[in-house]
Image: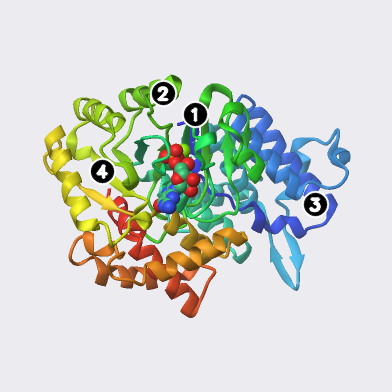
Amino acid sequence: MKYERLSIAHYIERHPVAKEKEAYRASYCHVLTYMTRKYAAQDPYAGEVLRMFLKKLAPADPDRTAGHDISRSVKKAGAIQLKSFKLFTYRYQLILDCCFINGMADPGRTTSIKRELRQLFHARYHNKLELFFRALYEDRAFTAPDFLHASFQSWQANRQFLSRQPVNLLVTGNMSAGKSTLLNALIGKKMNRTQSEACTASLHYIHNKPFEDGLHAVWEDDLDLNAGHDKLLRHPAEIAGGKRYVGTYFRSPHLSSARLCVIDSPGVNYSLNAEHKELAYTAVREERFDKLIYVMNAENIGSTDDRKYLSFIRETVPANRVLFVLNKLDQFKPSEDSVASTMHALRQDLIGIGFPEPVVCPVSAYAGYLAKQRLYNEELDEDESEELALLVRKYKRPEYDLSAYYSADAPAAMSRLDQAGSGDRGEHGEAAAKYATLLRRAGISLLERLIGTY
Ligand SMILES: Nc1nc2c(ncn2[C@@H]2O[C@H](COP(=O)(O)OP(=O)(O)O)[C@@H](O)[C@H]2O)c(=O)[nH]1
Ligand SMILES: [Mg+2]
């Protein structure tokens, strides 16, 4: 459960109390701090969430409430106020924040907090307090005041998300097959270093969140709920314990609502690095995953490393849990070869190794990654922009189009999904259509759709 909290999305950026006066915020923050210190002192996650709340809400002078009694602060934070000729109170916001910081995933702890709040609030509010807790933890209806909408909806979205069965995908394959690039393409963000010299020497667990909160959470030794890119793309050698846990929203119309955790693992390469190989084999043996995605490099399929590793996987993992991805198909030369014959030969090989009905998804992870970057308005450097332009031209040619290799109904269903999913994207109109087409023809949208059904 510890790391699963990385899939909780946050609402702090839209917190209504941020615009209140210092004296009010001081009492409000006093209550939040008091509850976390008392009920979740040993919990680094709660501590970090509190820190983020205080960063946004605390007054310039943190000692403003020094020596204040908690009941005085609760009274002030929950008091009825008059604003623009309307009476209102942040009482529900306060309750929700206390629950969110300390007990989103720990209803037991919330029971203690509720008991304490009951004592601190006047008896005439007890009934409403009860109703609000039922709305929070039993999903009962509740008419939330306007300013509470954003955080209440976030709460509900998180709860719904956490109630789904998690699906873990282990991504493995040979070194430089494009595993990290594929994950970056699926997630639509640069979450991992790609490049063979810095290939993943650790396991990276990346959890999806129910909505975009603009925050990348990284948990190595310490937890950072708002990690910058330097930390996110830190060299694997610097990662303590060889494991890194991340939470971020997946930018994909097919995956965004799925409670997914994808695990990036190092490649196996017998000759170069025994440690990577060991880590990869141990991951397949010991990690808990629902599906294994085996990424292959179309430029050199059928290598000895691949064969040995595939035989091991065949012995260790039920065949129907393995999905094969044939990557780097942007590199193939239509004059020399055809995707169809490569796919056919590969399937025969896999059947020979002992996978009776192998599902093979052809992709260009790199084309997919670049297309997504554009669709979500991320910066591309000059080289990337040029390569993207080239890939767009390439994928206009039917002999490169990979969507034909997915199920027959896919293209029609996809164009509907592309439209449905375009709402939260940056690019609009013709440009968006161009990159959405590239994403589909490079196999990425259809692979996402398939993964989305797990
Ligand atoms: N042309 C092409 N290059 C790719 C593709 N996917 C990955 N690469 C490149 O292959 C190299 C290794 O990719 P990486 O994702 O780090 O592989 P990993 O070791 O399996 O994680 C990098 O230079 C990538 O840019 C692809 O679809 N097409
Ligand atoms: Mg990698």
Mark toward the start of the polypeptide (2 vs 3): 3
Asked whether the residues under the numbered discs 3 and 4 touch, taking CB atoms below 8 Å apart as contact, a structural biologist would say no
Q: Amino acid at mark 1?
A: Ala
Task: Indicate yes or no: mark 4 CB to ligand 1 under 8 Å.
Answer: no
Gap in Å between the C-alphas at discs 4 and 2? 20 Å
Q: Secondary structure at mark 3?
A: helix
Q: On residue 24, which mark appears?
A: 3
Residue identifier under label 1: 201
Task: Indicate yes or no: mark 3 CB to ligand 2 under 8 Å.
Answer: no
Q: Residue at left 76%, top 65%?
A: 82
Q: Amino acid at mark 4?
A: Leu
Q: Nearer the viewer, mark 1 or mark 4?
A: 1
Gap in Å between the C-alphas at discs 1 and 4? 23 Å
Answer left or right for 180 relative to 164: right
Mark toward the start of the polypeptide (1 vs 4): 1
Mark toward the start of the polypeptide (3 vs 4): 3
Gap in Å between the C-alphas at discs 3 and 4? 55 Å
Report x, y in % for residue 278: 39, 20
